[in-house]
Image (cartoon, grey):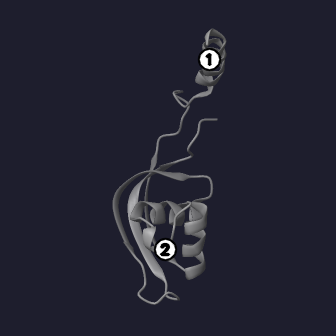
Amino acid sequence: MAARRTLFAIVLASILPTACASTNCPTPEPFTIDESLTPEQLDEIVTDYGLLSRETIGCETACDYGYRRTNGRMEVASVDSCSFSLPMNPNGVAQVSCSGKADEGFCE
């Protein structure tokens, strides 16, 4: 048990200096998106986020996906407002509109 604690302490000590507690981390940037999501993109959300079906896609998940799709490395840090609607027709287009703050998700 003591050996496990020692190993855990060593691993933790090596990780902490690289954590994002640094003042070099970028300030989250405000964003607003209004995106249409195709049936293929909805299926991609289900797969990428490990969901059961399109009906289980939450607004913040759709917002995160829509934002990342257009902004590459940036990821949603917080969502202030969000609206998401699935189409009645399975072949229809969904709509997500949201705003919040985004950052790069890690420190360099």
Q: How many marks?
A: 2
Which disc number belongs to residue 33? Answer: none
Say which residue label 2 marks. 54
Q: Where, by quadrant of the figure, is residue 31 drawn?
A: bottom left
Q: Residue 86: image x %, image y %? A: 42, 79
At which x and y percent is residue 65? 53, 63
Residue at 59 percent of width and 65 percent of height: 69
Rendered-image quadrant of the C terminus:
top right
Compare residues 54 and 73 and report the one nearer the observer.
Answer: 54
Q: Earlier in the sequence, mark 1 or mark 2?
A: 1
Is 81 left or right of 48, judged from the image as shown?
A: left
Q: For mark 1, what is the residue?
A: 13
Disc 1 residue type (three-letter): Ala
Q: Residues within 10 Å of mark 2 (few under 14, many from 20)?
A: some
- Residue 16 screen position, x and y as percent: 58, 22
What is the crowding at mark 1: few (fewer than 14 residues within 10 Å), some, or many (at least 20)? few
Position above or below: 76 against 67: above
Q: Is 96 drawn above or below residue 67 in the view shown?
A: below
Nearer to us of marks 1 and 2 is 2
The three-letter code of the residue at mark 2 reads Arg
